[in-house]
Amino acid sequence: MAPVAQEAFTMKKRINTFAGLALMLLAGNVQAFDSHVVGLAESHCYGQAMVGMDSVINSRLGVPAEHALGLSLNSSLHVAMEDVYSTSMLNTILAAYLWNDTPHSYAIKVFYACAARSGALLQSASN
């Protein structure tokens, strides 16, 4: 390679390396969503709604309900000798297998039912 071509190649490699490093550092600081916008009650209800929606889809695909029951374990009580399940999550999963409408409509139903049960004032994402 000629000295000029070698120098251009080296410069291009340095620029690409710098650009790649800059993009990696920037990507680490940017999130696809703002997790701090909603509170704990909203996050819990959203999670329960998503498990419900997935359970409706699983029921339509023929996945047995027993395969999803592990999602309803109370994670804070794993030290207990017996498995302790969240009653509301169990009801969400099992009722999803009887749902005749769309998975999205079930998720909305579950979210609003959870919000009504929580008793706390839920914040909107725009606040």
Image (cartoon, grey):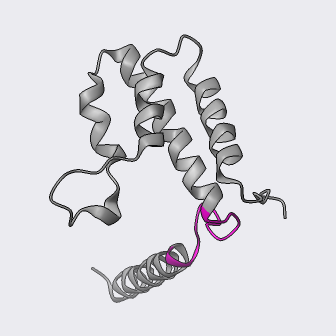
Above or below, 107 relative to 97: below
In the rendered image, residue 36 lying in the magenta stretch gets the answer: yes
Above or below, 98 relative to 66: above
Prevalent SS, magenta region:
loop
User: Which residue extends farthest front?
Assistant: 81
Residue drawn at the location 48% of the way across and 33% of the way down: 92
Between 114 and 49, the one lying in front of the other is 114
Residue 106, quarter of the rendered image:
top right
User: Which residue extends farthest top?
Assistant: 100
Quadrant for the N terminus, please.
Answer: bottom left
Q: Position of 3 compared to 112: left or right?
A: left
Where in the figure is residue 86, as x and y percent of width and height?
40, 47
Report the span colored magenta: 28-40
Residue 44, quarter of the rendered image:
bottom right
Where in the figure is residue 26, as x and y percent of width and height?
55, 78
Residue drawn at the location 30% of the way across and 35% of the way down: 68
Q: Position of 113 compared to 83: left or right?
A: right
Residue 100, quarter of the rendered image:
top right
Residue drawn at the location 59% of the way across and 13% of the way down: 101
Above or below, 57 relative to 27: above
Residue drawn at the location 40% of the way across and 26% of the way down: 94
Q: Position of 58 compared to 24: left or right?
A: left
Number of callouts = 0
In the rendered image, residue 63 lying in the magenta stretch gets the answer: no
